[in-house]
Amino acid sequence: MNNMSGSLAQYSEIYWGWPIAVYLFLAGLSAGTSIVAVLISKKYGKENYYFKAAALIAPVAIILGLALLVLDLGKPLSFYWILLLYNFDSVMSIGVALLLVYTPLSVIYAVGAFKNEIAMLKISLFDVVANLASKLSSLLEILLFILGIGVGAYTGFLLSAAHKIALWNTSVLPVLFLVSGLSCAGAFTLLVGVLKDKAKRQNDIAHYLLKFDFFAIIAEFLLIVALFMVVKSASTSGAESVANALSANSLGLMFYIGVIGFGMALPIILDLSVLKVHDFKREFAVINALFVICGVFLLRCYIVYAGQIFI
């Protein structure tokens, strides 16, 4: 990736490729799982597989995403300049400020979630952090919920700041990325929780996440429709970009089959069938979650690539 903070006015080639799509996916997943962890904690408590899964996924995903972003900068050893030279007119600088606060808090919260398991390691530093996380649990949850919304929306603002890219330059994109991140987070948490809860003792939480994802997918679909409508009505070039992005080319087929078909339509059908019964088959929930996760990732790829190809 070249000149990430510079002008994106002209593209003769793809400058923001798959590493950026993966970073946006992981950052959205992390933000979403922080929010999901807080919701599960408030509704079902902390002693369940689903809460622990969400609390752990959040820091792991953002750390992996940031590592990939730094390596993709071209000059990873110069990354510290972004930390020192803040420009709050820059979306990148605002995002870095958010992540500098969010990332360590998500790690502390995860350590607190595994307090009992960590106590068995008998490592004093971890014990101190775990005890601190337990004492500040309510404050951490408020902060992570707010920061999760900020980080989730930031992944969309990062692209929407490129004013010359029609598909990116819309206020709908940050909301779409936030909601799709929540959808992916619900699915990822469901996947890990269902695989761990083989005795099905926590099916009520699985049902909650299935219902959560059902409404998130519907909201995501409506936001995608809104995105295309807003871009199309904004200008002649925007209408042309939308027409090209939705045509039957390879990206269009990925959108229709991967994002809409496998990522939304099939999960909604599975959700409706699974939610009818309490004692559902684990396989259905696993397949549902995998479809949603893949669909959200393909949506990130589609937006990143289509925006640059169809200016």
Image (cartoon, helix red, strand yellow):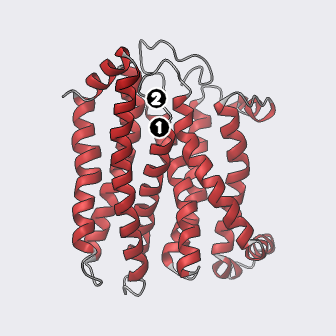
Residue located 77% across and 71% down the image: 136
Mark 2 — residue? 168
Label 1 element class: helix
Mark 1–mark 2 distance (CA, rounded to whole Å): 7 Å
Q: Is residue 211 visible?
A: yes
Q: Where is residue 256? Give x, y as percent.
A: 23, 40
Left or right of residue 280: residue 204: right
Residue located 25% across and 32% down the image: 252
- Mark 1 burial class by Cα count in 10 Å: few <14, some 14-19, many 20+: many
Looking at the rendering, which quadrant does residue 298 occupy? top left
| Relative height, residue 26 to residue 249 (above, below) | below
Question: How many labels were placed on the picture?
Answer: 2
What amino acid type should be assigned to the residue bearing mark 2?
Trp
Q: Is residue 197 visible?
A: no
Residue 17 vs residue 204, the one in the foreground: 204
Residue lying furthest front = 233
Q: Where is residue 129? Give x, y as percent.
A: 77, 70
User: Which is nearer the N-term, disc 1 or disc 2?
Assistant: 2
Looking at the rendering, which quadrant does residue 200 occupy? bottom left
Mark 1 — residue? 173
What amino acid type should be assigned to the residue bearing mark 1?
Leu
| Relative height, residue 201 to residue 153 (above, below) | below
Left or right of residue 244: residue 154: right
- Mark 2 burial class by Cα count in 10 Å: few <14, some 14-19, many 20+: many
Left or right of residue 306: residue 262: left
Residue located 29% across and 63% down the image: 288
Q: Does the residue at mark 1 contact the one at mark 2 (Cβ under 8 Å)?
A: yes
| Relative height, residue 35 to residue 147 (above, below) | below
